[in-house]
Amino acid sequence: MDSILLASWTTWKWSRNVAKKAYSLGRTAGVAYLKKKISEMYAWSPMKWVWKTIVAFSNVPTFWAIIEWIAHHA
């Protein structure tokens, strides 16, 4: 159970930090920044596949709304 909590915390912390940086860059640059950070992740990272799924099923306004939510609630 502790390893699951640690993985969840690590995922949240990474997402929070990257989303805050993306939000500070503005919508266009922020979305590009987050997509770049996702592409830099290790290929077999579960976190990468969660984010890739979000990107695949989101349009830019929805993706930006996710970034805003994380940036404001972290």
Image (cartoon, helix red, strand yellow):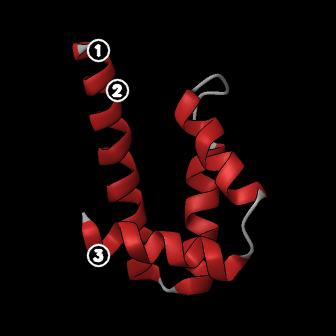
Residue 7, which numbered label?
A: 2
At a point 57% along the width and 28% down the height, the residue shown is: 46
Among the two numbered marks 3 and 2 on one chain, the one whose residue lies closer to the N terminus: 2
Q: Are marks 1 and 2 in contact (CB under 8 Å)?
A: yes
Q: Position of residue 28 (x, y in %)?
A: 62, 83
Q: Secondary structure at mark 3?
A: helix
Left or right: residue 33 versus residue 56 is left
Q: Secondary structure at mark 1?
A: helix
Front residue of 64 and 17 = 64
Image quarter for residue 68?
A: bottom left
Q: Position of residue 24 (x, y in %)?
A: 38, 80
| Distance between mark 3 and mark 1 Cα atoms | 27 Å
Which amino acid type is marked by label 2? Ala
Q: Position of residue 43 (x, y in %)?
A: 67, 27
Front residue of 26 and 74 = 74
Left or right: residue 57 versus residue 26 is right
Q: Are marks 3 and 2 in contact (CB under 8 Å)?
A: no
At a point 34% along the width and 33% down the height, the residue shown is: 8
Question: Which image quadrant: the C terminus?
Answer: bottom left
Pointer 1 residue: 3
| Distance between mark 1 and mark 2 Cα atoms | 6 Å
Q: Residues within 10 Å of mark 1 (few under 14, many from 20)?
A: few
Among the two numbered marks 3 and 1 on one chain, the one whose residue lies closer to the N terminus: 1
| Distance between mark 3 and mark 2 Cα atoms | 22 Å
Image quarter for residue 11?
A: top left
Pointer 3 residue: 72
Which amino acid type is marked by label 3? His
Q: Is residue 18 above or below residue 71?
A: above
Which amino acid type is marked by label 1? Ser
Q: Secondary structure at mark 2?
A: helix
